[in-house]
Amino acid sequence: QKEVEQNSGPLSVPEGAIASLNCTYSDRVSQSFFWYRQYSGKSPELIMSIYSNGDKEDGRFTAQLNKASQYVSLLIRDSQPSDSATYLCAVKPNTGNQFYFGTGTSLTVIP
Amino acid sequence: DAGVTQSPTHLIKTRGQQVTLRCSPISGHKSVSWYQQVLGQGPQFIFQYYEKEERGRGNFPDRFSARQFPNYSSELNVNALLLGDSALYLCASSPGLQETQYFGPGTRLLVL
């Protein structure tokens, strides 16, 4: 059973702060990693993907991957109230075509 | 370009009934995956189809079935509905099997 673990939160940060979201996974040979944002009552929308160790930046978002530690994180700089949502971590192993999702971390940005 | 579309948006059924959910992928995408998301949980993989063939199946009972058509659209069928089938059903499309998946708006199914 391939597992993806996220702290369910809720995580609260003040507006303008950095929000840090974490995800660990059990399958050592996992290949691809994704962060999705899901607003209440809506479907997940892709924020970014990361495939190699290190950091990947896209605007206010930075994904960090450490395959040796089986850990992927998402940093949101200058957090805005519109960032308030549930953030889902998804992992795709080397074998098979299935994406495995964590339960999500609920983020609230306080104005 | 249009994103992934799903129909219907909402559905109410009673136990024992059957339901068919529909999905049209992003133009040019050949792979469709289906997920079930219950409240408070992450999406759980049900099926993946690519070029009309099933390429992955999650841990769901045989009451769940799907197919993909020549235009790459897909249907998910659930027979003998149970209360526990109440969930948001998500369709995701990707260009190929190994690539990033993009979700549609989902179909919210309530089984009474």
Image: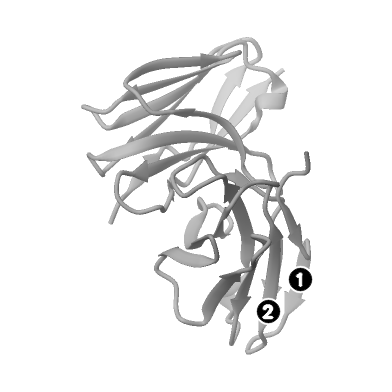
Q: Badges 2 and 1: C-beta atoms under 8 Å apart? A: yes
Q: How far apart are the two marked residues, 2 and 1, measured between alpha carbons?
A: 9 Å
Residue drawn at 55 percent across, 52 percent down: B40
Percent across and percent down for residue B17 are 67, 87
Residue drawn at 61 percent across, 48 percent down: B29
Instruction: Identify the disc placed on residue B19.
Output: 2
Say whether residue A80 is left or right of residue A27.
right
Tell me which chain the residue with mark 2 is part of.
B
Disc 2 residue crowd, few under 14, some 14–19, many 20+, Cα 10 Å = some
Disc 1 residue crowd, few under 14, some 14–19, many 20+, Cα 10 Å = some
Could you say which quadrant of the image residue A29 lies in?
Answer: top left
Residue drawn at 64 percent across, 68 percent down: B69
Residue B111 seen in render: no
Residue nearest the observer in this picture, B67 or B52: B52
Compared to B110, does B73 lie above or below? Answer: above
Secondary element under disc 1, as helix, strand or loop, is strand
Residue at the spot of label 1:
B11
Say whether residue B96 is left or right of residue B16.
left
Residue drawn at 52 percent across, 82 percent down: B63
Q: Quadrant of the C terminus of chain A?
A: top right
The residue type indicated by label 2 comes to Val
Q: Earlier in the sequence, mark 2 or mark 1?
A: 1
Say whether residue B59 is left or right of residue B41.
left
The residue type indicated by label 1 comes to Leu
Percent across and percent down for residue B14 are 70, 84
Residue B49 seen in render: yes
In the rendered image, residues at marks 2 and 1 fall on the same chain: yes
Could you say which quadrant of the image residue B68 lies in?
Answer: bottom right
Say whether residue A71 is left or right of residue B75.
left
Percent across and percent down for residue A63 are 45, 21
Tell me which chain the residue with mark 1 is part of.
B
Percent across and percent down for residue A23 are 38, 34
